[in-house]
Image (cartoon, grey):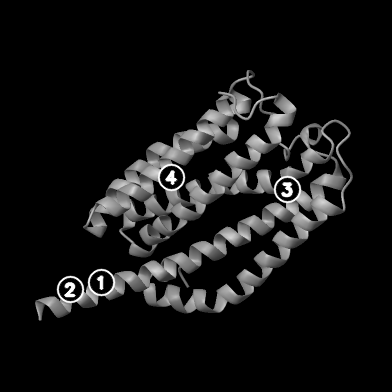
Amino acid sequence: MSLWEYANPARFMRLTERMLPVLGALAVLTVLMGVIWGFFFTPDDYKQGSTAKILYIHVPSATMAVSAWFMMLAGSLIWLVRRHHVSALAAKAAAPVGMVLTLIGLVTGAIWGQPMWGTWWAWDPRLTSFLILFLFYLGYIALWEAIEDPDTAADLTSVLCIVGSVFAVLSRYAVNFWNQGLHQGASLSLDEKENVSDVFWIPLVIAIVGFGLMFATLVLVRTRTEIRLRRASALMSRQRRA
């Protein structure tokens, strides 16, 4: 069976109806496990004390904020190349979720940074690109709402998504591109020397998996809603013409 068969809205709705209960349960379980383990069952950091425990919210939300944009990019490219409506609607559905995750990342980063850096905000390359990514989320959502024709809206937002991907990359890898800035390097890396200790690493990975499952669950729910709204709009248009 081809993956493209699920671009059919009816097939997508049937599949996701079966998936969502399991996916939602796993998301709740892993988010709670990772966050509770991290906040209550790990020691304080030897430099940052208990403040460092905000990483169990900050790192997963920031990671998924960037990943959400790349998921939107994939959906947008599929729409531009193959004109599958489900992919465009999935990208549209992901944007508000990604925007909230980006906002959580900005707020928790400020809370974490203030006692460490002595300031709530610094025009650090990574922080700045992450703020710009948040603005791109706002612009993407606003563009969908501003254009009445859904196909035209999907075309223009897809182009905007491609442009915004530059800042998604920068918000992830700015620390590698520029040595200047206050922001630390990656907490999780293929380089073992850059990884946090296992006592922090294991619950952090669980929290990231949980946030990923939560993102997937919310996007599927919102995509199903967008499909229903598109169907309702089509029915209302037919009734008016009749």
Crowd around label 4: few <14 · some 14–19 · many ≥20 (10 Å): many
Disc 2 marks a residue whose amino acid type is Ser
Disc 3 marks a residue whose amino acid type is Tyr
The kind of secondary structure element at disc 1 is: helix
Where residue 194 appears, as percent x and y from the top left, is: 77, 33
Where residue 114 appears, as percent x and y from the top left, is: 69, 30
The kind of secondary structure element at disc 4 is: helix
Image mark for residue 56: 3
- Earlier residue among tags 4 and 2: 4
Q: In the rendered structure, are the residues bearing label 1 and label 4 in contact, judged by CB atoms less than 8 Å apart?
A: no
In this rendering, is residue 221 above or below 144?
Answer: below
Which residue is labeled 1 in the image?
233
Crowd around label 3: few <14 · some 14–19 · many ≥20 (10 Å): many
- Earlier residue among tags 3 and 2: 3
Which residue is labeled 4 in the image?
137
Where residue 188 appears, as percent x and y from the top left, is: 73, 40
